[in-house]
Image: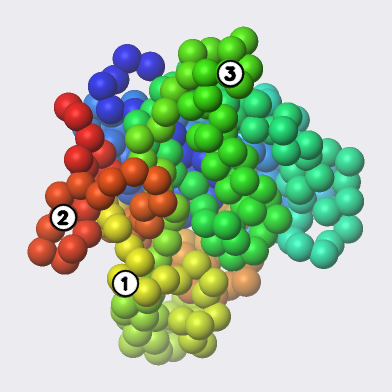
Amino acid sequence: MTADRRALFVHAHPDDETINNGATMAKYAADGAGVTLLTCTLGEEGEVLVPELELLAAAEADQLGGYRIGELRAAMEVLGVADIRFLGGPGRYRDSGMMGTPANEHPRAFWNADLADAVAHAVAVVRDVRPQVVVTYDENGGYGHPDHIQAHRVAMGAVAAAADPAYRPDLGEAWDVAKVYWCCVPRSVLEAGMQALAALGEEAAFAGIASADDVPSVVSDEQVAAAVDGRVFAKHKDAAMRAHATQISVDFPFFALSNHLGQEILAVEYYRLVKGERGPAGDDGWEADLFAGLPG
């Protein structure tokens, strides 16, 4: 990784990266920054939205994880991201399913992983990539999915451990990440998208979300630190989401997951800063660049 600016995005399953950060990743990749994606599971427990592929599901042939590697690579090709990694290697950790489901008890479920071991795998990536910026979820994983929560724990644990020269010198030279961001959606942005979908009436492809209070990842506008404008790459994000066809239904500018509730495809993506100092902000009070304030 030779780029002067380097960002590491840590996500739970294939498709999470595109939904949360697709426009941001495309923008930085196009700008020549180093963009690395670290995915923690293969998403084996996902519901399959493509009827002819239903037999790939966990309860059938249990081949969805391998198929989703292909979807992920296709999506990242659209976004211009070449450095794709899996925590501990592809298939080491299995999708844990939703909280309280039998999938949580699988012996390889990421939710049951030894946290110290998982953190060590992530430290190896951090010390190899040496990113100034790391992006992941908040402590609730955005919406309470066990793998998202575990990805948060692993990412934050790895940021701390990677900076400690006494921790596992065999994993590389210590590296202190300058800034850590958590993905988020400002309430004002979510509500604007809800109104736009509702305005379509019967022409809408998806049902609307009843209330912004039903979306756990929504935050007050005051909690937002950065807004990365990737509108030039809106069509790239749209195409990347379509590449995750087993998981995402797209009717641009909206998409839906297996719950069939429509959400806006955001080409301006938002972040909370939890480590490091804020850089210069625009008139809205938000950074426009995740590298803002950093040398170079």
Instruction: Using the image, tell me which numbered label, if any, was put on residue 221.
Output: 1
Tag in front: 2 or 3: 3
**Corner quadrant of residue 102:** bottom right
Q: x and y percent of residue 146 in the render?
A: 70, 55
Q: Which residue is mark 3?
A: 166
Helix, strand or loop at mark 2: loop
Quadrant, the N terminus:
top left
Q: Is residue 264 visible?
A: no
Tell me the kind of residue under disc 1. Asp
Label 1 vs 2, first from the N-terminus: 1
Q: Which residue is mark 2?
A: 281
Q: x and y percent of residue 235 in the render?
A: 30, 51
Q: x and y percent of residue 63 in the render?
A: 78, 39
Q: Is residue 148 visible?
A: yes
Helix, strand or loop at mark 1: helix
| Residue 233 position (above or below residue 203) | above
